[in-house]
Amino acid sequence: MTASMLDKAAIILDCFIPSGGPYRLSELSERTGLPKPTVHRLAADLIRLGWLERTGPQYRLGAKLFELGSLVPRRRDLRETALPFLQDLFEATRETVHLGVREGMDVVYLERIHGHEALRLPSRIGGSLPLSCTAVGKALLAFSGAELTDELLSRPLPRLTPHSITDPARLRMTLEKIQVSGLAYEEQEAALGVSCIAAPVFAGGTTVAALSVAVPRERFSPAQLAPAVRTAALGLSRAVRGSS
């Protein structure tokens, strides 16, 4: 492939963010703005490389991408260090727990342990969601510096549900409260019927990740969940500092 073909292939892969697909050829062409013949030719190359898979008329991301992504050293090491703390948090709450890191204006999920009750969550391992719509994202955003906050607030804020925060002043006030309490909350802002509580993970004064607990809204009790979330985040922060 020439450089321009690589760019177009990257555009095709990027269009799977954040939902992961699957998409038909016509949908890929529409989402990428590329002609159908070009998408068809490049998709065939990506399937051959294992970066895409095809089932009937639908394309989805290939297993090779997951394999490569899991080998990224920084994320792999962080995930492996975090797993015992995530497992402890799950045992303490019996609810769905997440580990996420910031990538641009999104949170990317490195790990998720399901609770016993199936929650309809948009989060998935390797997937991303807007920082402003999730508890993990807001925990990361609140401690990532004023410059990032100002940049995010200068753009239209995404709306995943009717409860997503789209008012910049309200989001700024929310971030200030997180900076004081060290805890971030989400009330049906990424998925209806789901609430979350999250805490940041620090290494050398820098926010490197955040972890959260997601529960059905009707039994969301921040007072009960907060101590376990804080304990897990503090423990992981110490472990990350010790391994660096």
Image (cartoon, rainbow, N blue to C red):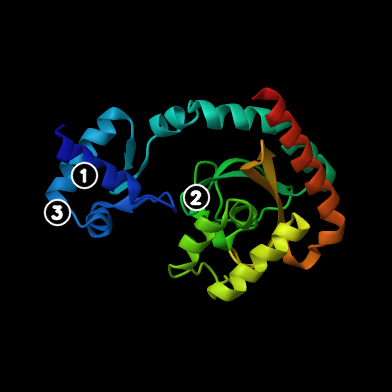
Q: Which comes before the other along the chain, label 3 or label 2?
A: 3
Dot 3 lies on which element? loop
Q: Does 176 appear above or below 110?
A: below
Residue matched to label 1: 8
In this view, the residue in front, 184 or 120, is 184
Select label 1 or label 3 by which is in front: 1
Identify which amino acid the numbered label 3 is placed on. Pro
Dot 1 lies on which element? helix
| Residue 140 in the image, given as x and y percentages of width and height | 61, 51
| Residue 159 in the image, given as x and y percentages of width and height | 50, 69
In the image, what residue occupies the spot 54% across and 73% down?
168
Q: Are marks 3 and 2 in contact (CB under 8 Å)?
A: no
In the image, what residue occupies the spot 44% across and 53% down?
19
The quadrant holding residue 205 is: top right
Mark 1 surroundings within 10 Å by alpha-carbon count, few (fewer than 14), some (14 through 19), many (20 or more) = some
Residue matched to label 3: 35
In the image, what residue occupies the spot 75% across and 32% down?
238
Identify which amino acid the numbered label 2 is placed on. Ser
Mark 2 surroundings within 10 Å by alpha-carbon count, few (fewer than 14), some (14 through 19), many (20 or more) = many
Give the alpha-carbon distance from disc 1 to disc 3, as whole Å. Answer: 11 Å
Quadrant where the N terminus lies? top left
Residue matched to label 2: 128
Dot 2 lies on which element? strand
Mark 3 surroundings within 10 Å by alpha-carbon count, few (fewer than 14), some (14 through 19), many (20 or more) = few
Horizontal side of residue 30 vs 158, given as left or right: left
Give the alpha-carbon distance from disc 3 to disc 2, as whole Å. Answer: 27 Å
Q: Are marks 1 and 3 in contact (CB under 8 Å)?
A: no
Identify which amino acid the numbered label 1 is placed on. Lys
